[in-house]
Amino acid sequence: MQKTLAFALCAAVGAAASAHPFGEKWSTPIPGPIGVPSEAVELDEGFESYSVGAGVTSMGGWELWPGGFDATVTDAQAASGTNSGDWSLTFIDVVHQFADITSGKVTFSSQMYIPSSSDVVYYMIALNRYDGGGAFTNWSIQVQFDSLLGSVTAQFGGQTTPMFFDRWVEWRAEIDLDADTVDLFYDGVEFASDLSWRDGVSGGGDPVFVAIDLYTDFSGTGNDVYLDDVRIETGDSGCYPDCDSSGTLDFFDFLCFQNAFAAGDPYADCDGSTTLDFFDFLCFQDEFALGCP
């Protein structure tokens, strides 16, 4: 199976290169070929384009919450590639804003690594309004990761699930802005369902997805929490490598991805670099290998 997929990747690279030159940038989305799924990857941050030791807000559209500290890029841990983001400092508070996510389904996910020696209180936050943390800002999701309690908690609903240490674990929120629902998952297990996007935390919110906030409230050891493969996807699938939306990962997804690349579709920018090149094929192969929830 691995040899077959490797052959498919090489064949796809060769064919796509003749149709779409490597390194070509795109600035506006164009219609994709038949078979390309309706979902779009709004963010796919693996920290691979950063130098080790760089601040996360130095590129990639990240910014500091006013008064917060920056996360740094490290090669001490990685879920994929060689780098991850190190959030092991009290009051690290990093935001990424989004535009025009005003309807439909949104998937917010990240790989997390928390050592058993950690002493940390960390939060995954999603916002429906953001004005730099002022009175207009409105919270929709706030999930607490407390290493001393060993728990993951959906605030303010109170749903909890045990925390896992010393390995990479996926955290995921599946959001339906139209239905006003949020389902939360940790290590593939749903631990909170049918929460309200508009009223689940602050209350009186809007049916839009405007920002994520990755926040360390307390870090006691300096070796507490690492993040990798932070993703925001819109659309129905929520499974990036299922390119043909068949519900099954197979050879035809590689052909679908090849078609998307050849057509210059933004879907094929797997690594989020805004440049279509060989690394997008490697990224797609990695996503395929990770599978889908």
Image (cartoon, rainbow, N blue to C red):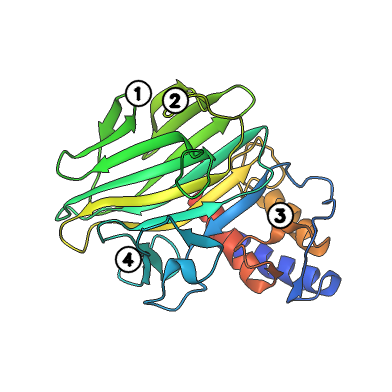
Residue in front for this viewpoint, 229 or 85: 85
- Element at label 2: loop
Residue ID at (44%, 35%): 141
Answer with mark 1 or mark 2, whichever residue precedes in sequence. 1
Residue in front for this viewpoint, 187 or 272: 272
Residue beneath label 4, please? 77
Separation (CA) of disc 1 from disc 4: 32 Å
Separation (CA) of disc 1 from disc 3: 35 Å
Separation (CA) of disc 1 from disc 2: 7 Å
With 76 as the anchor, is 140 left or right in this view? right
Amino acid under label 2?
Gly
Separation (CA) of disc 4 from disc 3: 28 Å
Where residue 231 appears, as percent x and y from the top left, is 53, 51
Say above or below: 70 vs 143: below
Q: Which circle, 4 or 2, is nearer the viewer?
A: 2
Residue beneath label 3, please? 267
Residue 1 seen anywhere in this rendered image of the structure: no
- Element at label 1: loop
Amino acid under label 4?
Gln
Residue in front for this viewpoint, 137 or 246: 137
With 8 as the anchor, is 195 left or right in this view? left
Amino acid under label 1?
Gly
Residue beneath label 1, please? 157
Residue beneath label 2, please? 200
Where residue 249 appears, as percent x and y from the top left, is 61, 45
Asked if the residues shown at circle 1 and circle 2 are in contact, with their CB atoms under 8 angstroms apart, the answer is yes
Answer with mark 4 or mark 3, whichever residue precedes in sequence. 4
Q: Which circle, 3 or 2, is nearer the viewer?
A: 2
Where residue 111 appears, as percent x and y from the top left, is 40, 51
- Residue 210: image quadrant is top right
